[in-house]
Amino acid sequence: MLESFKLDFQSVTPIYKQIENFVIQSVSDKDLRKGDKIPSINDFCREFSIAPGTVNHAYENLRQNGVIESKQGKGYFIRNESSLEKLNILIIFDRLNAYKEILYNTIFENLVDKANIQLFFHHYDKERFCKIIEDNLGKYHYYVVMPHFNEDVSAILKPIPPQKLIIIDKEVPKLKGKYSSVHQDFYADIQEGLNICLPEILKFEKINMLISESKFQFIPQDCVKGFTDFCESNSVQYTLIRKFSLDIIRKKQIYFVFSDLELFAIIKYSKTQNWEIGKDIGIISIDDTPMKEILVDGITTFSTDFVGMGKTVATMIIEGQKAKVRNKFLCFRRKSF
């Protein structure tokens, strides 16, 4: 059995997880059946020069999931092929923040009894993004991917079978095939929110969109284009601010922010100036979270419905649905604007 297994020590997938995946895949492929003995911990250690604790970690996870059992003095055996009826799902996010936690928790809560979920983060690193996908091809029933890149990543996603791929949050226009997606229309959503708020926008002298380059914040180009097109169509004075500093904060202007750190900085600075947020200065933030609902009596947000997105993804997986769905846009008008 071990002759068909190869460990990849350069992989982002932990060694213990590679061993788990190998056993699970062997059962799925009918190479192992109920009652079959699997290699011992010592067998793995001798063959691949790895620590016993690593193999034990993998075997303990398999035991807890009902895949294998140990028999005193005899070794480990396949316990139940039916335990593999749960779907194996790989989720790839850019990074963890408050709204990703809401999205992940919604998916998890709706699939907890039906799936085993593995979560990875690419951190806007295309090489890491590519390696995560390469290392995990053929190991999962579904790949739920958040491709937060302004560059085209269709070639990286192409090896994933379309019937197993669900794109979330951002579409990949050049990706061909009948894959599924639950995505935002960033251009239309920004325009919709700004149109809703136009009467309030016109009470201020100017609106500024903060688009500082950062390794920790994704700003879709379509958001910026939707913003500039709206302002020009409605004769609204605007500026795109590419480098944030407190020196750019002015009274009677609106600040449209993507970064929570910049949001906090603007609020803190406004307090030092004794400005009333919502009257002396306006703030609009991207992506709603519970914190923004209560921060300084409420931050106005433009957001997609992350709970709805998570439920749609779970339904697609459970029911095997194939579709491309524009997720619902939400505008929460609060006291900050």
Image: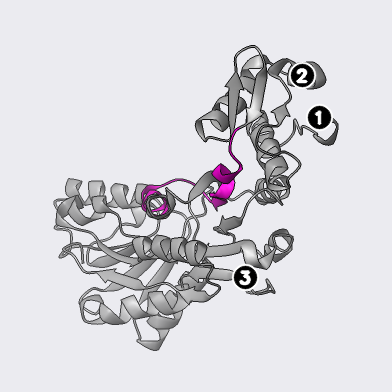
Tally of numbered tags: 3
What label sits on residue 43 in the rendered view?
2
Q: Mark 1 or mark 3, which has the lower sequence index?
A: 1
Q: Amino acid at mark 1?
A: Leu
Left/right of residue 295 with respect to residue 237 in the rendered view: left
Q: Is residue 85 magenta?
A: yes
Q: Is residue 336 magenta?
A: no
Q: CA distance from mark 1 to mark 2?
A: 9 Å
Q: Secondary structure at mark 2?
A: helix
Query: Which residue is tagged 3?
Result: 179
Highlighted range, magenta: 79-104
Crowding near pointer 1: few (<14 within 10 Å), some, many (20+)? few
Q: In the rendered view of the protein, which quadrant contains the N terminus?
A: top right
Query: Which residue is tagged 1?
Result: 2
Furthest residue to the right? 3
Picture residue at 74% right of the left edge, 17% below the top: 45
From what the image shows, is residue 36 above or below residue 116?
A: above
In percent of width and height, residue 113 lies at 43, 48
Disc number lying in front (3 or 2):
2
Q: Secondary structure at mark 1?
A: helix
One can see residue 26 in this view: yes
- Contact between marks 1 and 3 (CB within 8 A): the answer is no
Q: Amino acid at mark 3?
A: Tyr
Crowding near pointer 3: few (<14 within 10 Å), some, many (20+)? some
Q: CA distance from mark 1 to mark 3?
A: 35 Å
One can see residue 171 in this view: no
Q: Mark 1 or mark 2, which has the lower sequence index?
A: 1
Left/right of residue 35 with respect to residue 206 in the rendered view: right
Q: Mark 3 or mark 2, which has the lower sequence index?
A: 2
Picture residue at 75% right of the left edge, 21% below the top: 44
Furthest residue to the top? 73
